[in-house]
Amino acid sequence: MTALLELQDVNKDYRVGGFLDRSTLHAVKHVSFTLDAEKPEIFTVVGESGSGKTTTARMILGNEVPTSGTLRFMGKDIAQIRTRQERLEFMARVQPIFQNPFEAFNPLTTLDYYLFSTAKRFLGLKDKVAVDAATDKALQHVGLSLAEVRGRYSHELSGGQLQRIAVARALIPGPKLIVADEPVSMVDASLRMSIVNLFRELRDTLGVSIIYITHDLSTAYYISDRVIIMHKGDVVEAGRAEEVLGNPSHEYSRALRSAVLPPDPVVASAIIREKLRAV
Amino acid sequence: MFKILRDLLRYNIEFTIGFILTLAIFLFALAHFWAPMPDTAIYLLPPDMPPSAEYWFGTTSRGQDVLWQMSSAIWNTMLFGLSVTILSRLFAVAVGMISGYLGGKWDEFLMTINDTMIALPNIPILLLVYFVMRDQMSWPVLALTAALLGWNYDARLIRSVTLSLRNREFTRHAVFAGMSVPQILVRQHLPYVMPVIFFTAMNNLIWAIGLEVTLSVLGFSDINRPTIGGMIYWANQHQAIIAGIWWWIAFPIIAVVLLFLGLFLLAISVNEYIDPRSRLSRMGA
Amino acid sequence: MLAAVENKSASVEAKPVLRVEGLKAYYQMNYFGVRREVRAVDDVSLTIKRNEIYGIAGESSSGKSSLIKTIAGAITPPLRVVEGSVKFDFGGKELDVYAQRPAMKAARWKHLSYVMQGSMNVLNPVRKVKHAFHDFAFKHMGLSEGEFRARVESHLQRIGLDPRVLESYPHQLSGGMRQRLTIGLATVCEPEFIIADEPTTALDVLVQQDVLALIKGVQQRMGSSIIFVTHDMTVHAAIADRIGIVYAGRLVEEGPTLDVFQRPQHPYTAHLIASLPRIGDTRKRVALGGKPPNLADPPSGCRFHPRCPLAVDKCKSENPALLPRNSGRVACWRAGEVEAA
């Protein structure tokens, strides 16, 4: 097996506090996992705020350098990327999706500016027709077209549409890996599943691996192949989604699993009544 | 451009008043190109004449027409003030945005220079420049020196705006969309910095004109070239206030106050117009 | 006509604690000649009974937040009430939020209180927690300092907080504790009506259930009524007695929680419920097509028609009224066919 992404004993510490009470925060501790280059998958990192999941994502994207350990993408150490050329080559293979689609696009810039810039920089296209064609092709993958997006501003579209445009933009350079940090937490419920379904399609039709970072166990169960659960920087449980989320064994994952309320008034209200009696 | 002007004139009373005031004073200042006598000539007219039908704003003790002196003086003072403002805005934007966006060593280096400049006292430095330059001292040199002294606080302000923009998600998104640093700064961040630029420009203009007046009143500038400060200098030399030649000082000051008022109204209304929030509301967000 | 139906049913039961009638609240803006009117709350009528938890569900910019802001009387321009009324009934005394402002001001916190979304909005970061209690509640309770302190401490104990938190600063407490505190703050005067805006959204998953149980427990003990807003349907499932579904500024469906979940009558509700993911179920969920409505330029007729799988010509031109049907109310021309579909 050739590895697409390989994390080996990755640690990240932050210095926190002022002059007098300085201490070290271990944001990420001993994280290791490997994604297979031949077998695209949806790999989910589940955790609450402060679990280190976002720091892990930032390290994979090369925005943070680990304190110790290595992250290799297609055999190359991500922390060793120095020149702009290397960085561009890396970004053409690894692309992010951000949490809040309304924040991810500058409200004063037209959306197509992001798409065209990506096409020009990573595909080296100069000709306007070619740029349009590449952009339109990527938008078709997410069920949109350039005609719908050209000249529009972010406030003219819904969160779901914006998030799909963000995915389309990430697809333009033909990436191998997409890192999506809480991509649906700010998207309305009626549109959320369209994004999540889209990730499945990308995996199956384009062969893109996706690292899906979330606190929401229900969507994680719905789309993931493999899952790791992080708690205070540690990976407490890892494995296939059905096993880890359906039948968790670690104490923390069990607590997390039972904290999820089912969308069913009979069961959910019974859980709350049970809690009430316990107090 | 024309549409923006029309919208502003139609819907914003502050802009309309500011526009009329500034335009009137600009036209008045422009008129000095058609003045009946050269603005540096003295004793062409009977001195100390009060305002009358012949000399609307009276004449000075040096035999000059206050009306035409003022026309030239406002022109020259404004030319100086605007040069300082534009130059110093360019420094402030460049240093503030680069320092805020690049951070790290660049930020440390630029902010060290910036903070050192803040600590330097302005007037002594200008006097030093004046004594070094002596006869080569012209208004453009003075304007450049003032501009170099007048950008520091605003650079810090712009840096803080850019610093907060750098951490917004759309900036990270822009980086992954392959945009270069100039593209990000100009296309993504400048619209948010514009209101700061306009807002500080007004303060800076007032500061620059104040500086010009101070130096002229002290006599540290080309005193033969009419400026607002120069007029006050000569009025002072001739003890105009004691002699009761009030029109020599009153009219230039009224003109400057009106000009400031006009520019201030323009600045705040344009600011409201280009503010991202108001822009987004007009776009229908 | 609708109000008349409600009045009749209301007079039969105990008097409702809140009555909203034909409420319209619009954002009216004018920027350099660009005039815009956003109809955030458009002709909403609802009543809330005593001892009831009423949940308002809806998506972002559906107008649900504007609705509870308007009910609370906490609106600022450009949001204005254009038509309709909001009336509370506190101990038999009727209070019109927009006609009796001074009386309304006196009733705040004593009869009507709020649980805000971010606890840090209520707790001043540089002052100890006890000051917040003093500022909000002291003048409404008519107690001496000592009695007040004792009352606050026993109240905190009852909601599971150590009274020592009064001497700490907000940043020394965890997110769950802070949210407990804001609930304690809102309930210390034992108000008859509580308004909550996304009370669990900013919380970690692990403490969510505890906070919901706390809200439910406090409500049951005091017999007060709660209206709360959240986009999270599982929260509605857990604590709401009745749910109102808001779409594009209008109430499109309302009913007992169980019925809304099991037999939704409006196609939008039906879709919302069907698209919820569950652990243990990977069957493909279909997302709703189309784009959420723009409230500055809403679709004609029924506002859901451009995205509705059941839409017919009538839906495009005529707006369906919210009429009683089965155990609740629904605004849909094809309401009877939703269950079948």
Image: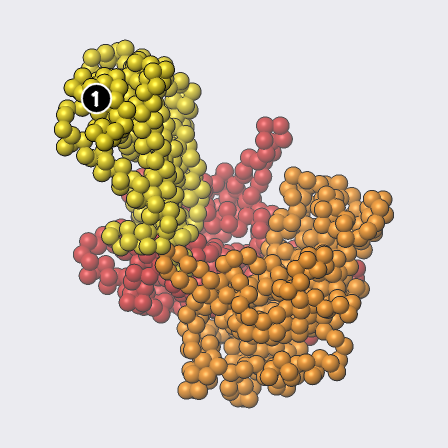
Chain colours: A red, B yellow, C orange
Q: Where A22 sits versus B19, above or below?
A: above
Q: Where B233 sits versus C59, above or below?
A: above
Residue at 64% across, 42% down: C125
Residue at 75% across, 51% down: C137
Residue identifier under label 1: B64
Residue at 52% across, 72% down: C42
Q: Provide residue B96's location: percent of width, then percent of height.
A: 37, 34
- Parent chain of label 1: B
The tally of labels here is 1
Q: Provide residue B212's location: percent of width, then percent of height.
A: 31, 23
Specify the farthest residue to the front.
Answer: B53
Where disc 1 sits, the SS reads loop
Q: Residues within 10 Å of mark 1 (few under 14, many from 20)?
A: many
Splitting the image into 4 quarters, where does residue C164 fall? top right
Q: Provide residue B71's location: percent of width, then percent of height.
A: 23, 30
Q: Where B143 sits versus B19, above or below?
A: above
Q: Provide residue C182's location: percent of width, then percent of height.
A: 69, 53
Q: Is residue A28 left or right of residue A107?
A: right
Nearer to us in this view, C16 or C306 = C16
Residue at 61% across, 49% down: C121
**Camera sees residue A10:** yes
**Camera sees residue A122:** no
Q: Where B155 sits versus C244, above or below?
A: above
Instruction: Please state which amino acid type lies under the numbered disc 1.
Output: Gln
Nearer to us in this view, B263 or A263 = B263
Nearer to us in this view, B103 or A124 = B103
Image quadrant containing the N terminus of chain C: bottom right
